[in-house]
Amino acid sequence: MNTFALLEYSAWGLSILLGLWMLVDMFRTDRSYSEDLLTSSREGEIEDASAVDPPQKRGAR
Amino acid sequence: MKVDASSSGERISLLRVLGPGHVWALGVGIVLVGEYMGWNFAVGKGGAIAALIACWFAGLLYTCVAMIDSEVTSSVAAAGGQYAHAKHIVGPLMAFNVGLYLVFAYTMVEAANAITLGHLVQIVGVMAGFEDASDKPFIVLTIVFLAWLNYRGVYTTLTFSLVITAFAFVFICVLFVAVQPWSDAYIKHDQLLTGLPYGWLGVLAALHFGMWFYLGIEGTTQAAEEVRSPARALPLGTMTGIVTLLIASTMTWYICSGLMPWEYLGQSVTPLFDAARLTNSTLLMVLLFIGTIFSALASANCCINDASRAWFSMGRDRYLPQVFGAVHPKYRTPYRAIAFLVPVALVFAYFAPLDRVITFSILSGLLEYTFMALNVILFRRKWPLGSIKRSYVHPFHPWPAVILLVLCSATYVAVFLGYGTQLIAMMVFYIVASLWFALHRYKYVRRGEQFAMPWPRPVGY
């Protein structure tokens, strides 16, 4: 196996890792929060939004 | 236990963290790759002078686009950009079509950039002696890595774009100074500019690829819900963006047409890199190669940002299934829209030929600009100046809209000359999609709730 083949395998490996990370995080997020909360965003206005944002933490599982 | 909206009384919105610099990066970041490659096919269509005329006409077209966009976006500051404009000003069917134009235009450009990056890495591999080097793993890595970056947060994503776009622009300036435009040491316009080899028909045909100098600047509007001060940042970022591109495109044409004969320039894959090679400077070659990589990376990155915001907005209004209207509670990004568009981009990057992908993108963009001209005329008629708050008012109305319509019509002819079958096939696709929306999907749309702007009734209603 040459150096470039190693690079190619690394690229495949990293792609799979990052893709899996997104899938797992999406699954965990969907399980932790209700659909109503996740889709509660409203269209923006010219003035800064008055939206109350949830705390920057994960919900209890 | 799940965190529930009804129990906590909270809601999630996209994060307002961006400044005018990020808006500039979003606009210029998508486009600058067009200076590094692609624009020069206009030279192949009609010669170097035809490409310059196309550069000026396309520059006028996109200056109109930037001015119109700045005014409408300063009033309709919502994710989805032109989709939201169409929804508020024209109506749902137009909005659905514009949303599709946006998603396809950006996803196709993303795929094209990933193909280009993979190809560049493959060339490096072959030049280093690895004959079996493949581009596929690097195409996939580009799309997945940038999607991951976008998934994790908009601030890091667009700061990354800002840095690499700024470097790519500076590298063009460095090359411009290095070829000493004040002398004839490198630049040989007196010998290389040979008039119009295909006459004025060549100029018309060159318009198709002249768009590459600026295609995508209108994407700045997609950041509307994530900038700290949309009324100031969006017009400022968009207008400085188009000025940057006008400078970059003029320098690019000047350098390349002064170093290479039009017969070669019209077929070059990486014209700016080739120009650097002709200076015999290793430093310039390295800088312009890095610039090519950076510009393609920035473009793909910004495309993911824009396509996902358009898809997200359509999901939020139920023009598409509502699941796509979700915002990540931690990263505050439209995470499902970002993830959903990954396989779409992969399919196009993996299986579709590059020229088809690019043409699909150009045609979607062209349809979008035609809409923008009509949209701003309706906007001024329904909500005249003074009836709603505008932080930017574009001058000389309605002339920018009229000029935009005329230039779009000329460009349709130019595209039809080269890709007539594809133009017709795409129109059929959008007609079928419109029928699906009108006959099936429209019953799910949030008809009242989708109009969130605190505007008075339009004139005449």
Image (tube, rainbow, N blue to C red):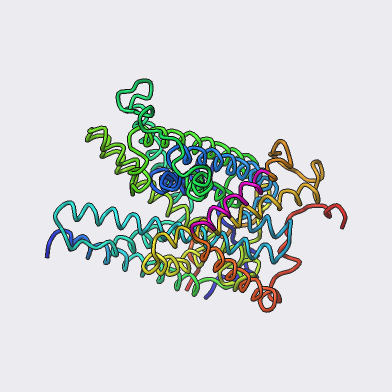
Image position of B368 (left or right of B134): right
Q: Nearer the viewer, residue B179 or B457?
A: B179
Q: Which contiguous range is marked in magenta?
A: B403-418
Q: Quadrant of the C terminus of chain B?
A: bottom right
What kind of secondary structure does the magenta stretch mostly adopt?
helix
Q: Residue furthest bottom?
A: B440
Residue B405: within the magenta?
yes
Residue at (41%, 35%) from the top-left corner?
Answer: B194
The quadrant where residue B253 appears: top left
The quadrant where residue B188 appears: top left
Count numbered badges in the picture: 0
- Residue B437 percent location from the top left of the image: 66, 73
Q: Is residue A42 above or below residue B284?
A: below
Residue at (57%, 61%) from the top-left corner?
Answer: B101
- Residue B115 percent location from the top left of the image: 35, 59
Q: Residue furthest left?
A: A1
Q: Is residue B102 above or below residue B211?
A: below
Report if residue A28 is visible in the image. yes
Residue B384: within the magenta?
no
- Residue B24 percent location from the top left of the image: 51, 41
- Residue B77 percent location from the top left of the image: 65, 50
The quadrant where residue B32 appears: top left
Q: Nearer the viewer, residue B13 or B221?
A: B221
Q: Is residue B417 above or below residue B68?
A: below
Report if residue B160 is visible in the image. no
Q: Nearer the viewer, residue B185 or B377?
A: B185
Residue at (43%, 33%) from the top-left corner?
Answer: B251
Q: Is residue B242 above or below residue B316?
A: above
Q: Nearer the viewer, residue B273 or B107?
A: B273
